Image: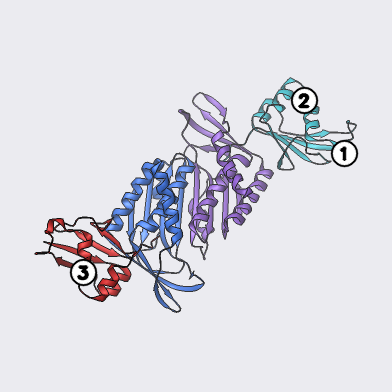
Chain colours: A purple, B blue, C red, D cyan
Amino acid sequence: MSVSLQAEAIDVATEYARLVGDAPGAAVATFTGYVRDHTDQQAVTELALEHYPEMAQKVLDELGHSAAERFQLSQWRIVHRYGALGVSETIVWVGAVADHRGEAISACEFMMDSLKTDAPFWKREQRLTGEQWVASRDSDTARRARWQSVEVE
Amino acid sequence: MSVSLQAEAIDVATEYARLVGDAPGAAVATFTGYVRDHTDQQAVTELALEHYPEMAQKVLDELGHSAAERFQLSQWRIVHRYGALGVSETIVWVGAVADHRGEAISACEFMMDSLKTDAPFWKREQRLTGEQWVASRDSDTARRARWQSVEVE
Amino acid sequence: MSITIKLFSALREALGESEFELDLVGMEPASSELDVAAIKAMLSKRGAAWRDALNQPNVVHALNHKVVFTDALVSEGDELAFFPPMTGG
Amino acid sequence: MSITIKLFSALREALGESEFELDLVGMEPASSELDVAAIKAMLSKRGAAWRDALNQPNVVHALNHKVVFTDALVSEGDELAFFPPMTGG
C-alpha cells in the first residue's frame, strides 16, 4: 500500500518479497518496465527522467488507492525512478495482490496505463543523433481512456 | 521459453532473474498463484495436486509457444507444482517478456486462463470437514472462452 | 492390438485403477476403425461403477495427451486417458 | 498576494526557469477571482517565448498538484505548474 520515488535501481526481488509478505493473497501480479535501447529505429544510449516530486507522489498514491478499491486489492505497490538511467535498467515496477487472478492482473494494467498519462514524469532520450524529449503517444492516451469508460458504469 | 513441472516450492526471485536474463525486453509481466486458506467459506488446511505428467508438459509447452506467437514475446516461462502443498505456498508462476506492456500483461492473463481449464491438474483439498476434489468453475471456462473468440478474428 | 488406459483424479479413485493395458484383439467392428466411444462402451461392460463413471457428461478424454471427442479413432499402442474437468493453476 | 509558478521538461528548458514567485498585487480583475487563464495571460506578457510556450494546445496546468482546466481559480500561496504531456512509466 505504498509508493516509492527513487533514483536507485529497483530491486525486483526485494519489492516482490515485501509486497507478498508472510500472508499472501491467492493471486499476485507484477509488471516491470525497462529502458529500451531504441525508439522508432533510433538507438538510445541513456534516458533522463525528470519529475515533479510532490505531484508524482500524490498522483501515484491516489492511483494505488483507486486500484485497491476498484479491484479489491489486499496489497499494492508502485515504484518509479527518476534521474539518469542506462539502457536495460528498470524504470517502473507495480505489484498487486488480490483474491482472484483477474483482479490482480487488471490492477497492474490499470496502474500502468494510468501512470503513463497521469503521473508527472518526462523522458529525455540521449540518442546517437542528440538529445530529445520523448513525445507522448496517442496509444497511451487510448489505453488510459478504456478505464474511464469503465468508471462510468 | 520453457516449462517446469516440479514438486518443490517456486523460487519467484530466481525465476524472475532467469526470465529477464542479461538483456531484458522493455516490458515484463508475471503472475503467481498461491494456495488459499479457504474455499466457499470453508477452511482449507492442505492441497494435493494430482497431475498427468506427459500431457501437462505437452499442454504447457504448446500454451507457451502459442502465447509467444500471439503476443510477440521474446521470453516466457511457466512453472507449475504438483504433490502436497501447504496453505500460502506457491502453486503456479508465469512470466512474459515483450516490447510493449499490453502484450506482456495479456500474455500472462492468457496463459493463466488457458492453463486453468486445459492443463491436466486436479486439486484435492484437505478441509476441516474432510477431503474433497475441487470442482471446476464456470467462471474459469468463461474466462478461457474469451480468448477463443479472439482467435477466430 | 492393445492400448494403454489411464485414469485420473475422481475417476481413478472411483474405479481403483490408474493405468492398465487394454487388449482389443477380436473386437468388433474391425479394430482399425475403433473410436473412443467404442472403448468407453467396452470398459462400461466391466460393471455399474465403470459405466457410471465413464458416462458422466463432463468426463474428458485425452488420446495421446490431447483432448479429443468420442469419434477420435484409436490405434495400436495409443494412450487413452479419462478424467474430470481440469482444476490446475 | 503571490503564487508559486513551476515549469517542467521542455517548457522549463524553453523558458529558462524552473520555479519562481509571481506577485499578483494590484492585478485586475479582483485578485480573488483570478483563474489559470488570467495567470497564463499575465505570464504571456513576458515575451514571445512565454506566449508561444504557454499557449501550445497540449500544455498541462496543475494547480496544487492536480491537473485543472484554465477556469480553475487561483488563491494566495497556490502552486501552479505548466508542463507538456506526461511520459512516465
Query: Is D46 or C62 nearer to us in this picture?
Result: C62
Which disc, if any, is residue D32?
1
* C-alpha span from label 3 to label 1: 89 Å
Residue occupied by mark 3: C43
Please tell me whether mark 3 sits on a helix, a strand or a loop: helix
Q: Residue furthest left?
A: C26
Residue type indicated by callout 2: Ser
Quadrant of the drawing holding the N terminus of chain A:
bottom right
Q: Amino acid at mark 3?
A: Leu
Query: Do we see residue A14 in this rendering?
Result: no
Q: Are marks 3 and 2 in contact (CB under 8 Å)?
A: no
**Relative to C44, does residue D67 appear above or below in the rendering?**
above
**Three-letter code, disc 1:** Ser
Q: Which disc is residue D44 wearing?
A: 2
Q: Are marks 1 and 2 on the same chain?
A: yes
Q: Nearer the viewer, residue C7 or A90?
A: C7
